[in-house]
Image (tube, rainbow, N blue to C red):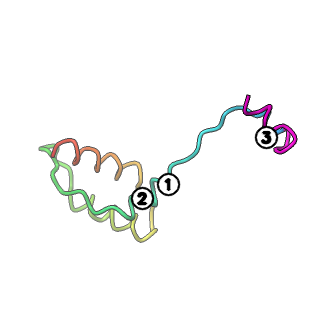
Amino acid sequence: LLKRALAGLVPADILARRKKGFGVPLADWLRLLPYPGDNDFGLGLDTEAVRRWDEEHRRGRADHRLFLWSWMVLQHHAA
């Protein structure tokens, strides 16, 4: 119904294309959020290395978004 209503207003190739998701600016969000904490939950993780990765990410020197997101979720759910 919506596609029919927009016919003539929106180019046909846009109306005919498949659904498309949108990306989440996770890397940018992680630069805005505070550091989540250093609890390694007995896993033996080098929390100083995690802090360095966080700093590298915040300064734009590296993209550690996948690791940092996992670290943040782990910290949040264990709290």
Q: CA distance from mark 1 to mark 3?
A: 24 Å
Q: Nearer the viewer, residue 67 or 72?
A: 72
Identify which amino acid the numbered label 2 is placed on.
Answer: Trp
The disc label shown at residue 62, or none: none
Q: Residue furthest right?
A: 8
User: Mark 3 Cα within 10 Å, few/some/many (few <14, many 20+)?
Assistant: few
Where does residue 32 sit, x and y in percent of width and height? 38, 64
User: Is residue 77 or residue 55 the one in the foreground?
Assistant: 77
Residue displayed at 46% across by 68% down: 60
Magenta-colored span: 1-12
Was residue 9 drawn as part of the magenta stretch in this picture? yes
Q: Horizontally, is 40 left or right of 2 in the view? A: left
Rendered residue at 76%/34% (across/down): 17
Marks 2 and 1, how far apart at CA: 6 Å
Q: Quadrant of residue 42?
A: top left
Q: Residues within 10 Å of mark 1 (few under 14, many from 20)?
A: few
Q: Tag 3 or tag 2, which sits nearer the N-term?
A: 3
- For the point 78% across and 35% down, the residue is 5
* Rendered image: mark on residue 25: 1
Q: Which residue is mark 2?
A: 29
Element type where label 3 sits in the image: helix
Mark toward the start of the polypeptide (1 vs 3) = 3
Which percent across, then down, holds residue 20? 65, 37
Query: Would you say the residues marked 1 and 3 are in contact, meaning their CB atoms lie under 8 Å apart?
Result: no
Residue at the far bottom in the pictured view = 59
Which of discs 1 and 3 lies nearer the camera? The answer is 3
Residue at numbered disc 3: 14
Question: 14 or 38, which lies in front?
Answer: 14
